[in-house]
Image (cartoon, grey):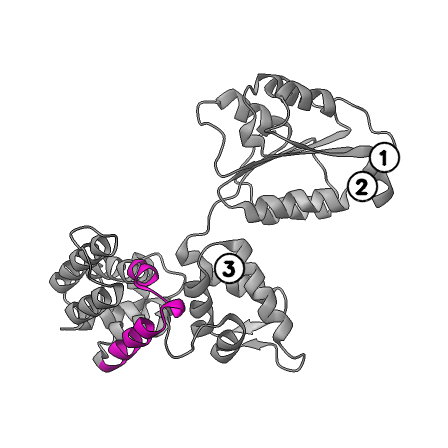
Amino acid sequence: MAQAIVTYDGVMRDLEARHFLPLYYLMGDESYYIDKISNWIAENVLQPEERDFDQTVLFGSDVTASQIVDAAKRYPMMSKYQVLIVKEAQNIKNTEPLEKYFKAPMPSTILVMCHKNGSIDGRKREYVKAIQQVGILFESKKLRDRDLPSFIEGYLRARNVSIDTKSTQLIADSIGSDISRLVGELDKVLLSLPEEDRRVTPQVVEDQIGVSKDFNGYELRDAIVNRNIFKANQIVKYFDENPKAGSIYSFLPMLFNYFQNLMIAHYCPQKNSQERVAEWLDLRSPWAAKDYMTGIKNYSAMKVMHILSKIREIDAKSKGLDNPNTPPGELMRELIFFILH
């Protein structure tokens, strides 16, 4: 059957309604969603007593496509379905036998192909078409940094927990876009919350994840946006003395992203309007443009251009280019001085 955009929520909604298809091809760079879907199928389609007979797990590095097809053509013994899960599907060499099978799959087999760290070769159009005609082709993409706050908020909201904007950004900045690790940290936070107060605050983040509520990337960015020289240097000094709490390698992308967007904001036709700037930058809400409105006032377009150039220079030096021995802390102080003066 032809497919529109296939989402994780859509796939899970159909699975939970027990609307099963003969093929689920799960691919992409983000393993979290691939594991969630395949694990749900492994744990919920068959009853525990049926799995020994009618559920099989194979690995693409250990079997051929022909062997997978032979296994898929078997009839279930104890259940309505046979579940066949193929992990490391990206390691299967010759996929021609699979393509033939996809065109006429066994209706009693639920075949789950787990293709991690990449996607199907774009040249295999017939292979993709065969998958889409009979089943689900799902691509699990890495979350962009800009999408992390909404993921965090949505994950907690689904569990009846609220979180403020600062706490959300603290978690996003400290954990990054590794969803498996991010979910693990969020679950740890959830377990720590008392039943009478289901709120995540900066103090909770500091206690449970180990991110200082006063000295962190969020506060550094805020100090730079508002040209608070004293506070910015306080934070940089803290990180220089506590390298495990943060480093130049995590702050450079954050600062580059801000000033890159600020440069774009400078060219917004109505840059005095928070709503128009939010639309121009494709932000989630007008409120998210607040820091850019402040940045427009505090940094001219020419200054922003020079800052972006300086960030690139410092990034190169932090990686050893034209920099034999300047330590990261000194490079960070150099950059902050350049930005704020």
Please report the residue visible at 26 percent of the width from the left and 76 percent of the height from the top.
232
- Real-space Cα separation, disc 2 to disc 1, in angstroms: 7 Å
Mark 3 vs mark 1: which is more N-terminal?
1
Q: Residue at x 88, y 33 (%)?
A: 78
* Identity, as a three-letter code, of the amino acid under mark 2: Leu
For the residue labelled by badge 2, is the local secondary structure a helix, a strand or a loop? loop
Q: Which residue is mark 2?
A: 46
- Tell me the residue that label 3 is attached to: 151
At a point 48% along the width and 42% down the height, the residue shown is: 29
Is 233 contained in the magenta span? yes
Q: Is residue 273 visible?
A: no
Q: Secondary structure at mark 1?
A: loop
Foreground: 241 or 203? 241
Res 85 quadrant in image: top right
- Which residue in the protein does label 1 denote? 79
Look at the image and tell me in which quarter the N terminus lies: top right
Span shown in magenta: 230-253
- Cα separation between marks 3 and 2: 31 Å
